[in-house]
């Protein structure tokens, strides 16, 4: 009988059920519930998040809205060694109107936070996932966190999503995902400042934007001509396909102003061939191309 009892204890420990003393808080103090895989974590989101995590290899991730932890655990399992994930949710037992009106969803509310903690324990992610039991905006104001990836998936109301983005953007470290490559020239003379750029703005893992432009600031005002182009690969990793170009013209002076041609050497404004373009006073933005959304809808510009 003693042998059976000891074997049972050993089996429970090896299966990860009796590990309370090894768990950090708040996991250590929770009564563990059976694993519950309920959630709305779509396959498309899984594919794109896995791609982004693989490319960025973030050390700090913030998730806004966690429910029972389906997306939390998925991301935690994909992170590299030493990375952490802050799961921000109030785990409010009141729930939204949509949750309250669904019998299955509302039945989860009473043990929502307990089930989340239990799920993370079952998947052995307690050393990676740090639960933050706050409203998303409260957490943005209270926490000193900088992350390479912020996954916004709390309230899906338009105003709430906007507020989450605005409040959490300052916490986002874009040093690893934003890169500027190319040529920039500055010419400062008695008649003003000329800036020329021929560059690519690389936004990992979405793609790159090619930018060619010229800008002059002098006593008359500001004149600028900027061309932007996106190819089909831009946005492909997040389910979008862009094929578009844009031209921005700005002239704050009182008359038309000549700008250099595209092959002009910025150090020698007279070196370009072809007819210089004249920018009329005012503002002009022209966009041409198309955007394909997730393969099922297209927008032509």
Image (cartoon, helix red, strand yellow):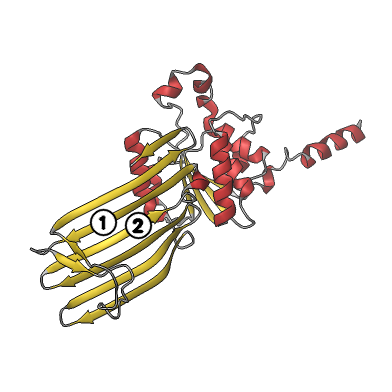
Horizontal arrangement in the rendering, residue 27 relative to residue 271 (left or right): right
Look at the numbered disc 1 and give the secondary structure of its residue: strand
The mark that comes first in sequence, 1 or 2, is: 2
Q: Is residue 126 visible?
A: no
C-alpha gap between disc 1 and disc 2? 8 Å
Left or right relative to 40: residue 179: left
Q: Position of residue 130 (x, y in %)?
A: 54, 47
Residue 124, compared with residue 172, is above or below; it is above
Q: Residue furthest front?
A: 274
Q: Is residue 285 left or right of residue 167?
A: left
Q: Looking at the rendering, which quadrant does residue 56 occupy?
A: bottom right
Q: Which residue is mark 2?
A: 228
Q: Residues within 10 Å of mark 1 (few under 14, many from 20)?
A: some
Mark 1 = which residue?
248
Density class for disc 2 (Cα within 10 Å; few <14, some 14-19, many ≥20) is some
- Quadrant in which residue 4 is drawn: top right
| Residue nearest the observer in this picture, 207 or 265 | 265
Q: What residue appears at the point 62 percent right and 36 percent down from the top-left corner?
A: 119
Q: Quadrant of the C terminus?
A: top left
């Amino acid at each position: 009988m003693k042998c059976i009892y000891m074997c049972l204890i050993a089996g429970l420990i090896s299966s990860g059920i009796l590990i309370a003393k090894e768990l950090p808080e708040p996991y250590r103090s929770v009564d563990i519930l059976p694993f519950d895989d309920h959630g709305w974590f779509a396959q498309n989101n899984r594919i794109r998040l896995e791609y982004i995590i693989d490319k960025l290899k973030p050390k700090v991730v913030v998730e806004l809205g966690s429910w029972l932890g389906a997306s939390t655990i998925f991301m935690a399992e994909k992170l590299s060694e030493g990375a952490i994930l802050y799961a921000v949710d109030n785990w409010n037992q009141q729930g939204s109107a949509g949750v309250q009106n669904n019998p299955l969803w509302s039945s989860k509310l009473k043990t929502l936070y307990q089930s989340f903690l239990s799920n993370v324990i079952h998947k052995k992610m307690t050393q990676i996932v740090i639960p933050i039991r706050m409203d998303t905006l409260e957490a943005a104001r209270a926490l000193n966190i900088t992350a390479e990836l912020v996954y916004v998936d709390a309230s899906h109301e338009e105003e709430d999503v906007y507020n989450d983005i605005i409040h959490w953007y300052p916490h986002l470290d874009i040093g690893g995902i934003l890169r500027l490559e190319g040529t920039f020239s500055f010419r400062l003379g008695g008649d003003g400042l000329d800036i020329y750029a021929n560059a690519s703005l690389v936004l990992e893992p979405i793609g790159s934007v090619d930018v060619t432009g010229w800008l002059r600031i002098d006593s008359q005002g500001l004149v600028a001509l900027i061309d932007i182009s996106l190819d089909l690969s831009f946005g492909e990793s997040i389910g979008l396909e862009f094929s578009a170009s844009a031209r921005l013209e700005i002239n704050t002076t009182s008359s038309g102003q000549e700008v250099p041609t595209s092959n002009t050497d910025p150090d020698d404004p007279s070196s370009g061939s072809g007819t210089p373009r004249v920018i009329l006073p005012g503002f002009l933005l022209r966009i041409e191309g198309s955007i394909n959304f997730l393969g099922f809808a297209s927008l032509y510009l």
